[in-house]
Each structure stands twice: as C-alpha cells, then as structure tokens.
Image (cartoon, helix red, strand yellow):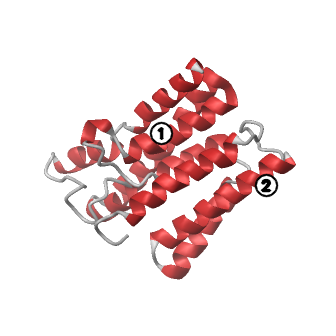
Amino acid sequence: MVPALLSAAAGYLIGTVPFADTAARVATGGMTDLREAGTGNPGAVNAMTVLGPSWGWGILAADAAKGAIACRAGRRLAGSTGAHLAGTAAVVGHCFPVWNGFRGGKGVAVSLGQCAATFPAYLPIDLGVAWAVGKRTGRTLPGTAVASATWVTAGLLWWRRQWPNGWGPEPTAALPASAAVSSAVIMYKFLTAKIRP
C-alpha cells in the first residue's frame, strides 16, 4: 500500500511541473500569462498560438515527457500498478496543480506520455484516431473524446486477451482503469473550459 501511495504522490508532483508557465516567462520576459492569453489554457496548443509553434511543440514534448517519467518512477516504486497510478496522478497534477491554485492545463500531452510508457502497443492508434477526428471536425475536443474512449476500450481488450504490450507493463485491470480516470479528468477540463477549444 505504501509503495502505491508513494507512486501516486510522485506522479502528482511530477505532473505539477509548470513547463508552459516557465516557457511563457522565458519567451516574453514575464509579460505573458497563458491563463490570461489566447484560450486561457496553460498548455501546448494555446502556447503555439500565443508564443509560436516552436514554443508550443517544445511544451508538448516536455509535458509528454513528464507523463512518461512519472510512469517510470511509479513502476520503480510499485511495479506495473505503480506505473498506472503515477501516470494518472501526473495527469491530475498537470490539470490541478496545487502551486497554481489548481488551475492547470487539460492534460492531453501528459496522457500521451502516460500512454507511451504504459500502453505503447496502442500509442500509434491513439495518435491516428485523435488526428483523423480532429482534422475532420477542425476542433480538439472531438478528437480527444474519441481517442479517450478508444484508449479505454483498447485497454480492456489488451487486458482481457493478454495481447503483447511492447515495453509497457503486462496488461492488467489497472490499464483500462487508469485510462478511464485520466480520460475523465481530461474531458472534465475540456467541458468546463471557459473558452471554446
């Protein structure tokens, strides 16, 4: 129980690392707050618009990395269950960072890192679904919603059928459960956003 709690705590703390805020301060000399500019979301997509594509892609990569690092830390502390706990906790930490009044990003990039670390067999499908739906609709929300539902469904299939999972942990019930919780947090952030995504 203690290793699992430590995994969740470590994941949350890693998730709160404010890459977008730091990038905005560096790029504009502290003159821009992503929570007040553009869509008001301190994340990669808003940063691409406000700070420029290079900054946005850099933030996306950094946020995905912290999701993967959290999973790695959790796996070292509590095995495969710890990896799933830490990955989901990182998404929560990114979306609700205690240091910023619980006003964080939407967690999509962090969940990408979580998926890469815990469910690499599904990652290409996830990216393909999100891109295809997003391109067709021209909006981020539909692609994220469909990709989230597919992530959970695929997790159930991989667990029940024990399909190979690349470098990720052996599929267990924790795989679809963590995907479901992370997806729920992300969708909550999208649906409660003040500005249309």
Residue at which label 1 appears: 90
At 53% from the left and 65% from the top, the residue drawn is 144
Residue sitting at the far top: 2
From the viewer's perspective, is residue 161 above or below residue 11? below
Query: For the image shown, how many numbered marks are present on the structure?
Result: 2
Tell me the SS state at disc 1.
helix
Specify the quadrant that holds the C terminus: bottom left
Left or right: residue 117 compared with residue 188? right
Q: Taking the image as drawn, is residue 2 in sight?
A: yes
Considering depth in this image, is 56 or 125 the residue closer to the camera? 125
**Residue 123 sits above or below residue 171 on the image:** below
Q: Position of residue 151 (x, y in %)?
A: 65, 57
**Circle 2: residue type:** Leu
Label 2's element?
Answer: helix
Between 87 and 112, the one nearer to me in the picture: 87
56 in relation to 82, above or below:
below
Lower position in the chain sequence, tag 2 or tag 1? 1
Q: Residue at x 51, y 72 (%)?
A: 142
x and y percentages locating residue 171 in the rendered image = 76, 41
Crowding around mark 1 (Cα neighbors within 10 Å: few <14, some 14 to 19, many 20+) is: many
Q: Which mark is residue 119?
A: none
> 22 or 74, which lies in front?
74
The percent position of residue 65, horizontal first and vertical second, equals 50, 41
Q: Amino acid at mark 1?
A: Ala
**Which residue, as the protein is rendered here, is positioned at the far front?**
1
Give how far apart the Cα atoms at labels 2 and 1 are.
Answer: 24 Å
Rendered-image quadrant of the N terminus: top right
- For the point 63% across and 28% down, the residue is 75
The answer to whether marks 2 and 1 mark residues whose Cβ atoms lie closer than 8 Å is: no
Q: Look at mark 2 in the image and give the residue it sits on.
A: 157
Q: Where's residue 143, x and y in %?
A: 54, 69
